[in-house]
Amino acid sequence: MAHIVILGGGIGGVSAAYEIKAELRKGDTLTLISANPYFQFTPSNPWVGVGWRSKADITLDLESLMKKRKINFIPQAALKVHPDHNIVELMNGEQVQYDILVVATGPELAFDEIPGLGPIEGGFTHSVCTVDHATTAYEAWEEFCKNPGPIIVGAAQGASCYGPAYEHAMIMDTDLRRRKIRDKVPITFVTAEPYIGHLGLGGVGDTKGLLESKMRHRNIKWITNAKIDQVTQDMMHVTEVGFDGNPYRQHEVPFKYSMILPAFRGVAAVRDIEGVSNPRGFTIVDAKQKNTKYPNIYAVGVCIAIAPLEATPVATGVPKTGFMIESMVTAVAHNIGNVLRGKEPVEEGTWNAVCLADLGDEGVVFVARPQNPPRNVNWAADGKWVHYAKIAFEKYFLRKMKKGTTEPFYEKAIMNMIKVRKLKDKINNPLG
Ligand code: FAD
């Protein structure tokens, strides 16, 4: 009988726990190890940043969720994975033996790569990457609104997650208009992307035109190809890089409030392991989500290694979005089910992306099938309905996590209708 261990209780890890549970044979055991005792619905964090949601609204207690599904839960951070011995060493010194390991540890936030960046010691910018960061950002937001001034919002060099920076910029804009103080707040969007709407994906549909237009309508200025050199108490020092990769212009942008998404890297527990992690600490997997050196290690979510889509003047990474992560999870669950039954792990996730970006009082939706170009479907649209769809999706996803289901039949039916699937259909349509 096998012991399957999942490391990380985020969107990837919890979905994996539910889907793998359904694949177990009688007698197999499943354990979820997570640094946090709660699951957080990360996409709602920009709303937490302005007080439209609280931590309690978007988190679920993992202990009780796992207990209901008869999945062991260890609320501990892993110190190190030892793949030669099939052991996860925990921070408290305990060791957990596994037969199969699923790494779902998300990102480590690399604030330390830029002096003055982040809500860390010596840092002057906020973050909405975690619910705790977003809660701190909200406390500062209330103070800022009493005595407003310029805002800088965006994503640093090497970042791979851009959507939430656009969301937070326009959610803050909406909140400031509601508070009737928008006229006191110049907003500058600073991003490593070569153009607005690139998103680390070379754009999807006309996200370039759509998001530029939104920024213009909302009086948000931008600096693209931006490399943040340093942040001080009230000033951001930015080098704008030309398309030849050389410095083109220096900017010193004053701010009173700032939220910058950092670059990501793999977490220390799975970093610097020969054959497991790449130089940034991301877990190396093949198309089956399986590590090649250690075939009993799988990985899903933000922690996996994906090469940048294209060379950009300032480094940009590829985002790993929610539906794409769910497709990795479904492939891993099926593959583990196969392996447990003596079959080959043949399933591949489609990595299709369906994203709802909330802009406070409207939104932008895009479908990229597959996520990386060239694509079979490359579509983006906007409207007020997207804002309401994102709220509905938040409630729906949290409900799914509470109930322990990842894809009810009606969700599958709807996604099938728009031909967005999780597993590659190897016979009829290799792109899913
Ligand atoms: P995470 O959700 O980060 O989960 C990682 C888990 O691993 C955490 O529970 C963490 O505590 C745990 N962990 C870390 N280290 C250890 C350790 N050493 N030992 C044990 N446990 C550990 N995508 C979309 O498609 N749509 C969106 O609207 C969207 N919005 C986003 C908004 C924000 C602010 C961010 C940052 C990302 C957003 N994404 C969105 C991208 C993506 O869906 C999320 O980042 C998602 O949370 C990634 O899931 P994950 O499971 O890979 O990582």
Image (tube, rainbow, N blue to C red):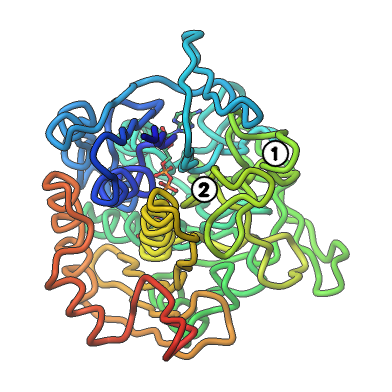
Number of marks present in the image shown: 2
Image quarter for ligand 1? top left
Residue 90 vertical placement versus 196 (above, below): above
Q: Nearer the viewer, residue 264 or 139?
A: 264
SS state under label 2 = strand
Image position of 284 (left or right of 385)? right
- What label sits on residue 114 in the rendered view? 1
Residue projecting furthest to the front: 342
Residue 119 vertical placement versus 184 (above, below): above
Whether ligand 1 has any atom under 8 Å from the Cβ at mark 2 is answered as no
Q: Residue at x 29, y 45 (%)?
A: 24
Q: Nearer the viewer, residue 365 or 186?
A: 365
- The percent coordinates of residue 21 (x first, y second) are 26, 45
Residue 246 vertical placement versus 282 (above, below): below
Instruction: Please rate how many residues cluster around mark 2, counting C-alpha atoms within 10 Å: few if below 14, some from 14 to 19, many from 20.
Output: many
Instruction: Please rate how many residues cluster around mark 1, counting C-alpha atoms within 10 Å: few if below 14, some from 14 to 19, many from 20.
Output: some
Q: Is residue 75 visible?
A: yes
Q: Residue at x 74, y 62 (%)?
A: 314
Residue type, mark 2 in image: Tyr
- The percent coordinates of residue 239 (x first, y second) are 76, 56
Q: Earlier in the sequence, mark 1 or mark 2?
A: 1
Residue 251 vertical placement versus 432 (above, below): above
SS state under label 1 = loop
Residue that label 2 marks: 298
